[in-house]
Amino acid sequence: MDTVSGGSTMKTDPRAVLSWALYDWAAQPFFTLITTFVFSPYFASVLAATPEEGQSLWGFATAAAGLGIAIMAPILGSVADATGRRKLWIFVFSIPFVISCWMFWYAEPGGSNSIAIALVAFAVGTLSIEIATVFNNAMMPSLVPAPQVGRLSSFGWAAGYASALITLAIALLLFSADSHTGKTLAGISPVLGLDPATQEGDRVTGPFSALWYALFVLPMFFFVPDASAKEKFTTAIRKGLSELHASLSQARANRNIFQFLIANMIFKDGLVALFAFGGIYSAGQLGWGSIEIGIFGIIVIITGILGLLLAGPMDDRLGAWPVIIFSLVILMICGLGMVSIDKTTVFFIIKTQAAPEGAQFASLPEQVFIGLGAVIGSVAGPLQASSRSLLIRLAPREHMSQYFGLLALSGKVTSFMAPLAVGIVTALTGSQAGGMSVVLVFFAVGLVLMWGVKEQRAG
């Protein structure tokens, strides 16, 4: 299909667009199964001595990955711009990512090295997939005309959400078992002879994520066009570092881009904490187990897909800025509602009965929590999708990989701050709700900074 954009004709290849979106589909199980809904609650409740210690250690691993991304992503983005090669770098970082996913299987309960294995695998896996994503994002402008970038970005996020829904359902129905009954959500024993006593159903999500990624990332390598080689690697390093310095200076000089990157840094910190501790928080406040947390995750993912399907056209029609502002406002309102809930309380002051023993989602606090979480899911994806489409509209075209490196830098360089703040406030107040309320501050500051950003390209 040929599309006219800005006076030039651009050919859009549907197969390339679909193959590009399959990257998000391929990578998503790591974030869904490992980071949020299955392995991280297992780490905090089984491997670590206490949930508080588990939350702290998981935060340190997240911080270590964020530091590595902060150092490497902008430099490698500059090198990719200079060499013109992106798929090569995706392949390079896919190797440690797949190995890291497989290592989660060996983090067995009571193992002398299990905690170290889990933390190293999580840090290296996070570092690898986030850097690979920088290069995948940088290919977007070559796939569709500029007016369709928002829709493409949302399509990629929607593919990721659909993958999350399917893989989480697979994990709940076939792998993860209830700690009391030893049965999965389907009422059967875990498949493949997985042993519930040693949490093999939770641990197998690592190898499953590795295989899922290895299979579905292949179309991107085969069908998405890459730029032709420009510079040799050694020359590209010198040129890339020089251009990185220039881009940092340019970003600081351009108040609009710089303010957006700072805002992105702050509200992404809030999202990091929200997703990193969401499972642990619901388990502590409402007493949910892995099955309940997984069902809640499926609901959030479904609303996330619906939100992305609506947000993509809105992004293209109204711009990315209104989508980001609206999403942050909703996150603040619903986040405040969620921290007001415990087993017998809604909105801080409304007292109600706790759920009967063994009854699933039977109490008012659980039902309100699910409703608020569903709304949060509907805006979290559009917030991230519109952030990358906004960058494409702001950044100079000839340095797109470089600026996506800066976006990754802004999204990860302080990613330890919100989890660390949650841990500190939780320790000081002795309250999970008090700790998680810190996330609202990050969303509020990000909103104030985004208010002053203009949706216009830098010269």
Image (cartoon, helix red, strand yellow):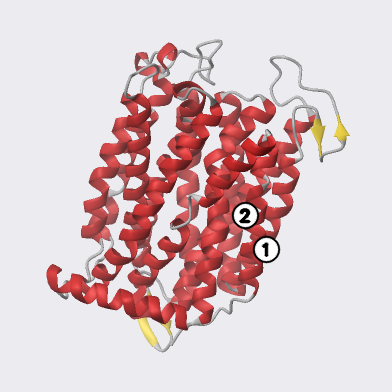
Could you tell me residue 251's position as x and y percent? 44, 78
Closer to the camera in the image, 10 or 74 = 74
In which quadrant of the rendered view does residue 111 lie? top left
Residue annotated with mark 2: 379
Q: Earlier in the sequence, mark 1 or mark 2?
A: 1
Residue annotated with mark 1: 326
**Residue type for callout 2:** Val
Task: Label 2: state its secondary structure.
Answer: helix
**Residue type for callout 1:** Phe
Q: Is residue 309 above or below residue 192?
A: below
| Quadrant of the drawing holding the N terminus | bottom left
Lateral position of residue 347 relative to residue 286, left or right: right
In which quadrant of the rendered view does residue 280 lie? top right
Could you tell me residue 155's position as x and y percent? 48, 58
Could you tell me residue 144's position as x and y percent? 40, 71
Residue farthest to the front? 428
Closer to the camera in the image, 222 or 392 = 392
| Quadrant of the drawing holding the C terminus | bottom left
* Residue at the image point whose x is 54% and y is 43% from the top: 275
Q: Are marks 1 and 2 in contact (CB under 8 Å)?
A: yes
Residue farthest to the right? 350
* Residue at the image point whose x is 37% and y is 39% from the top: 122
Q: Is residue 427 above or below residue 238?
A: above
